[in-house]
Image (tube, helix red, strand yellow):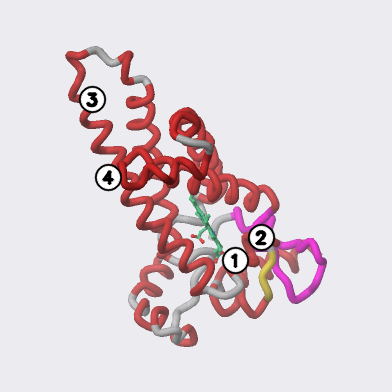
């Protein structure tokens, strides 16, 4: 497993039965990504359909939304890039993930006791991460092309049309991933939401959901003592 898990040994509470799952920096960047994405979602949907334009009123009206959307897109892109630099090793698919994926039926039916052990993230979390990364790159490139549309010469108009199409497709894909992510993180996996707020999880939670990660962290912490 990656060495990225090594800082996750000391908890703020110092309690023996708690493990640090997300550092303060990871949590802050995650919520910058989360809140900026919600702003992009509201303003983006407002521009997409006249039926949804009322959404712009939630964030200060049409002109404010039009001004804020591209700048907030840059904030979101920086947060995603930071996540990539911090988590890319933990997000690689491993043989343990492939084994786990064969038991996904048990995961859905809440028979977690039948699941093989996995590392810091499960394969669904990893696929969501890569979807947001590549979706984010597509949204950034197509978004910048639309932002600077007046500088694109008429002979390059294919670029304008491609940018609109790419932006819409990438937005729909990331919205799908976002809805599943929020549902899984808030309603389905108990203890996950507290971890992205406070940073810590219980030893029992870590052993139940991410046993290989737990053993790695435990090994690192006993070496530190
Ligand atoms: C605003 C609504 C959001 C909520 C309620 C939310 C919730 C959560 C929770 C509970 C976790 C911890 C899961 C665990 O460790 O078991 C998490 C992790 C994570 N979040 Fe979010 N999140 C939100 C937005 C986002 C956005 C917009 C992104 C886009 C980059 C994102 C990317 C991630 C990633 C990559 C992880 C680590 C792996 C994973 O659990 O999928 N989150 N989030």
**Residue 84 visible in the current orientation:** no
Mark 1 or mark 3, which is nearer the start of the sequence? 3
| In contact (CB < 8 Å): disc 3 and disc 1 | no
Q: How many badges with numbers are in the image?
A: 4
Mark 3 or mark 2, which is nearer the start of the sequence? 3
| In contact (CB < 8 Å): disc 1 and disc 4 | no
- Magenta span: 3-23
Q: Callout 1: few (<14), some (14-19), or many (20+) C-alpha neighbours within 10 Å?
A: some
**Residue 114 visible in the current orientation:** yes
Instruction: Name the quarter where the C terminus is drawn.
Output: bottom right
Left or right of 207 in this view: 158: left
- 164 to 33, vertically: above or below: above
* Mark 4: C-beta under 8 Å from nearest atom of ligand 1: no
Instruction: Determine the secondary structure under disc 2.
Output: helix
What residue is disc 1 on? 193
Q: Separation of disc 3 and disc 1 at Cα? A: 41 Å
Q: What residue is drawn where x is 57% and y is 47%?
A: 86
Left or right of 82 in this view: 10: right
Instruction: Determine the secondary structure under disc 4.
Output: helix
- 1 to 88, vertically: above or below: below
Q: Separation of disc 3 and disc 4 at Cα? A: 15 Å
Q: Where is residue 59 in the image (x, y as percent from the top left)?
A: 52, 41
Q: Separation of disc 1 and disc 4 at Cα? A: 29 Å
Q: Position of residue 20 (x, y in %)?
A: 69, 63
What residue is disc 2 on? 197
Q: Callout 3: few (<14), some (14-19), or many (20+) C-alpha neighbours within 10 Å?
A: some
| In contact (CB < 8 Å): disc 2 and disc 1 | yes
Mark 4 or mark 2, which is nearer the start of the sequence? 4
Q: Callout 2: few (<14), some (14-19), or many (20+) C-alpha neighbours within 10 Å?
A: some
Label drawn at residue 169: 4
């Amino acid at each position: 497993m990656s060495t990225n898990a090594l800082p996750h040994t000391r908890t703020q509470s110092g309690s023996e039965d708690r493990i640090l799952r997300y550092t303060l920096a990871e949590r802050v960047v995650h919520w910058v990504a989360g809140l900026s994405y919600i702003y992009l979602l509201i303003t983006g949907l407002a521009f997409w359909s006249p039926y949804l334009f009322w959404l712009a009123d939630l964030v200060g009206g049409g002109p404010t939304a039009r001004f804020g959307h591209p700048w907030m897109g840059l904030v979101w892109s920086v947060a995603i890039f930071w996540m990539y630099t911090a988590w890319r090793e933990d997000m690689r698919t491993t043989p343990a993930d492939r084994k786990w994926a064969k038991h996904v039926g048990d995961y859905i039916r809440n028979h977690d006791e039948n699941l093989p052990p996995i590392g810091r993230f499960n394969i669904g979390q990893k696929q969501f991460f890569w979807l947001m990364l590549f979706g984010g790159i597509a949204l950034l490139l197509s978004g910048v092309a639309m932002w600077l549309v007046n500088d694109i010469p008429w002979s390059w108009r294919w670029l304008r049309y491609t940018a609109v199409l790419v932006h819409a497709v990438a937005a729909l894909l990331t919205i799908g991933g976002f809805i599943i992510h929020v549902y899984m993180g808030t309603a389905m996996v108990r203890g996950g939401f507290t971890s992205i707020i406070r940073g810590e999880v219980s030893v029992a939670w870590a052993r139940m959901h991410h046993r290989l990660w737990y053993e790695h962290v435990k090994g690192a912490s006993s070496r530190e003592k």
